[in-house]
Every structure is written in C-alpha cells, then in structure tokens.
Image: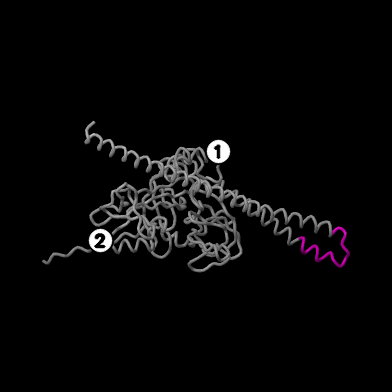
C-alpha cells in the first residue's frame, strides 16, 4: 500500500469520524428538542385542565352555597329570613351567570369555531441584491456562534436560511375569503426591534411561508396580505376558499355593544401548537412527533390531516372600554393574537392583540369599528383631469 493511499485512507477515516460525530450530535439535539416540546405540551395540558377544574369548582361552590342557604332558610328565625333570602337570590344569580357563560362558550365554539384559523408562517431577510441571510458554518460544517452564543448569519453563509417561524390566530370576516387578524401577525416584523436593526443595514423581510389552517380542513390555505390598518393593530388577509363551507363570523357594527362587566368569550390558538397537541391523545402526540420531529410546519400539517386543528375558548369579563381598547380578563398567550372576542350573544366585539400577564392577566382587544373600516374597500382615486387642447 503506497503512502498516498495510506494518507487517503487516513483522511477518509477522519472525515467519517467527523460525519458520525455530527450525526450523533444532530440526533442528540433532535431528541432534546422533542423532549422539550413534549414537556411544553404536558405543561399546557396541565394548565388547561387546571382552568377547567377551577371554573367547574366555582359552579360547584355556588351550588353548595345555594343548598346550604335553602336549608338554613327552612329553619331560620323570622329575623333572619329576609337576609337569607337576599343572599340566596344573589347566589342563584351567580350560579345562573356561570351556567349561562359556559353555555354561551359552548354555543359559540360549535357555531363559529370552524371559522377561526391557526395562522402559521415564516420569513427571512434579503439584501438589495436579493441574497438571503444564511447561517455561517465553521470548517467542520457546524453553525458558528459569536461571543454571546448567538448564531452568526451572513449573505455569504453556506448554511441554511435564517428564518423566523411565527403563529397567530385569524377569523373569516367576509365570504370573499377575507380574514381578520393583527397587523403584527400579517406583518410579523412590524415594530420589531431586531428587524429595525437589519433594515438599517440594508436588509428587508420577505415572507417565505404564509398559510391558514381552518378546523375541518385537512390542507392549509395559502395567504396573502390584502391591506393593513394605519390606526390600529389590524390586518386583512386573503385566502381562496373555493367551494369550502367555512362560517363567516358575525361582526358587531354598533357602538355601545361592549360594556364593562359583561362576559366575553375569547376564541383562538394561545401557545400555538402546544395547546392543540395538549388536547390530543398522548399516544397520538408521540406518534406525530416521532414521524415529523419538532419541525413546526410538518407537525401542523400532520395535525390538519388528522382533523386536530381546533381552537380553544377562554371566558372572562370586560374590565374597561376606551376609544381604542377593550380590556378583558379572559386568559390568553402568544399565538392567541388575532383571536375574536365574542359577547355572550355570539357577536364579535373585538380582536385580541396583547396581554399583560403580570397585571391581573388583562388582555386587550381592538374594537370592531376599526375592523369595519378596514373591511370597507379602499376608495378609488378619481382619474386626473385631461389637459384641454387650446383652440
């Protein structure tokens, strides 16, 4: 065996070792991602069950108090009767209110849940020459990190495209395929500090994938941005519905529909995929993750094929109404942005856009008057007058 062949064999064996090491590391990272994803799913399942138990407990406590007051009233002395009757009336009122709210949520999700979609997309950044930012790789083909531990990107990078994946909620507001959501969902880079830095360096965001997953639909619908509001965090998207029978949500056009203290039902996809997977059978979740890994696009497609894309509902009450906001306390989180806020009568009165979990769990919705303005077709510009010929 010649020295040249020995050297080639040595280099080849070293290359194989490096490849195996990279493969082993990739498998380890994928397994860690899968375990972390499953952990988030379990946490979401536990949180959902806790909220359901808490609501049920409020109903049961009201029923127990009603029974207790009824028994006391039957044996009360004459001086206690009126006070007990008043408390019993108030207790029955609370119980009726809780039962009504629960029934309203069930009615709303049954009638309009299929019109509330999960929005999923991804975007990257491109320079003026149309070159995308890619991850930089070291001599071993591994993504490079800077001193702070962040991955390095450059248009000359040889790695995968640097992309940002996002989720949100939207709902069908017009039979023509117009979907209402937040502007920060329709343009996920809007008012984003990292985007502003990149734009200052000459890069522009570009949507790579943008689609809507409606309940009862096994395939996603491609989305395009129709227009955005200049006065509120709202955007109008367009999808081609074809012959699909997707319910259009009723929108409240009248002022004064939102009043402090009244109950609301929020419908959407808080926490994105985790909430959807948390409602599915644990064995099915394991099967999906084993076949798709933790790639969010593939996971969502698998959920749609199995008919598991279904929105969640949370209930609360309006805390305040201003010209620009409806403040309410129905629980939500990232991914719920763009969700419709229903009155107990089943009318959309706001579009949820933000939350402050550290301040009593308050959430904020854009009043529907802004959405109605956005849904109106833009006024056509009058043609410029023709110059008159001189005689």
Q: Looking at the picture, how far across and down is residue 161, in whole percent?
A: 32, 49
Q: Residue at x 44, y 58 (%)?
A: 182
Q: Is residue 112 visible?
A: no
Q: Nearer the viewer, residue 141 or 391?
A: 141
Q: Are dots 2 and 1 in contact, CB under 8 Å?
A: no
Q: Residues within 10 Å of mark 1 (few under 14, many from 20)?
A: few
In-front residue for pair 332/111: 332
Report helix, strand or loop for mark 2: loop
Residue under label 2, please give it.
Answer: 383
Q: Is residue 20 above or below residue 184?
A: above
Q: Residue furthest top?
A: 1
Task: Tell me the quarter of the image containing the C terminus.
Answer: bottom left
Instruction: Return the x and y of residue 31 as percentages of the image width and height.
Output: 47, 43
Residue 1's disc number: none
Kindly identify the residue that appears in the image at 24 percent across and 31 percent down: 1
Q: Residue furthest left?
A: 391
Q: How is the image coloured?
A: one colour
Q: Which residue is mark 1?
A: 283
- Res. 297 in view: yes
The local secondary structure at tag 1 comes to helix
Percent from the top left, x then y, of residue 376?
40, 58
Image position of 302 with respect to 360: above or below: above
User: In the rendered structure, which segment of residues is drawn in magenta?
Assistant: 73-88
Q: Is residue 178 above or below residue 263?
A: above
84 within the magenta span:
yes
Task: Examine the structure image and report whether residue 119 is included in the region drawn in magenta.
Answer: no
Cα–Cα gap, marks 2 and 1: 63 Å
Depth check: 374 or 358 in front?
Answer: 358
């Amino acid at each position: 065996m010649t020295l040249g062949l020995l050297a080639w064999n040595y280099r080849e064996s070293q290359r194989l070792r490096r490849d195996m090491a990279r493969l082993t590391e990739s498998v380890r990272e994928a397994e860690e991602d899968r375990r972390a994803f499953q952990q988030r799913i379990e946490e979401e399942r536990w949180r959902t069950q806790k909220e359901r138990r808490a609501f049920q407990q409020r109903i049961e406590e009201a029923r127990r108090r009603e029974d207790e007051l009824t028994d006391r009233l039957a044996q009360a002395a004459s001086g206690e009767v009126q006070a007990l009757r008043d408390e019993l009336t108030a207790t029955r009122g609370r119980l009726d209110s809780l039962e009504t709210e629960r029934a309203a949520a069930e009615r709303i999700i049954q009638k309009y849940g299929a019109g509330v979609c999960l929005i999923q997309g991804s975007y990257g950044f491109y320079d003026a020459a149309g070159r995308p930012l890619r991850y930089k790789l070291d001599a071993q083909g591994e993504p490079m990190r800077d001193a702070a531990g962040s991955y390095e990107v450059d248009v000359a990078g040889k790695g995968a495209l640097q992309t940002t994946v996002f989720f949100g909620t939207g709902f069908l507001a017009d039979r023509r395929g117009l979907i209402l959501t937040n502007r920060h969902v329709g343009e996920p880079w809007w008012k984003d500090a990292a985007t502003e830095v990149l734009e200052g360096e000459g890069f522009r965001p570009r949507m790579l994938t943008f689609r809507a997953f409606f309940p009862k639909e096994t395939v996603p619908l491609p989305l395009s941005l129709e227009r955005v509001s200049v006065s509120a965090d709202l955007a109008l998207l367009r999808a081609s519905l074809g012959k699909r029978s997707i319910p259009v949500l009723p929108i409240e056009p009248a002022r004064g529909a939102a009043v402090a203290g009244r109950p609301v039902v929020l419908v959407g996809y808080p926490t994105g995929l985790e909430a959807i997977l948390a409602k599915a059978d644990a064995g099915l979740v394991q099967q999906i993750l084993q076949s798709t890994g933790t790639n969010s696009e593939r996971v969502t497609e698998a959920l749609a094929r199995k008919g598991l894309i279904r929105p969640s509902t949370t209930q609360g009450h309006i805390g305040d109404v201003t010209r620009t906001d409806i403040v309410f306390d129905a629980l939500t989180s990232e991914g719920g942005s763009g969700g419709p806020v229903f009155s107990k009568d089943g009318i959309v009165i706001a579009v949820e856009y933000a939350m402050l979990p550290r301040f009593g769990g308050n959430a904020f919705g854009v009043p529907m008057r802004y959405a109605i303005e956005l849904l109106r077709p833009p006024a056509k510009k009058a043609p410029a007058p023709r110059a008159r010929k001189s005689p």
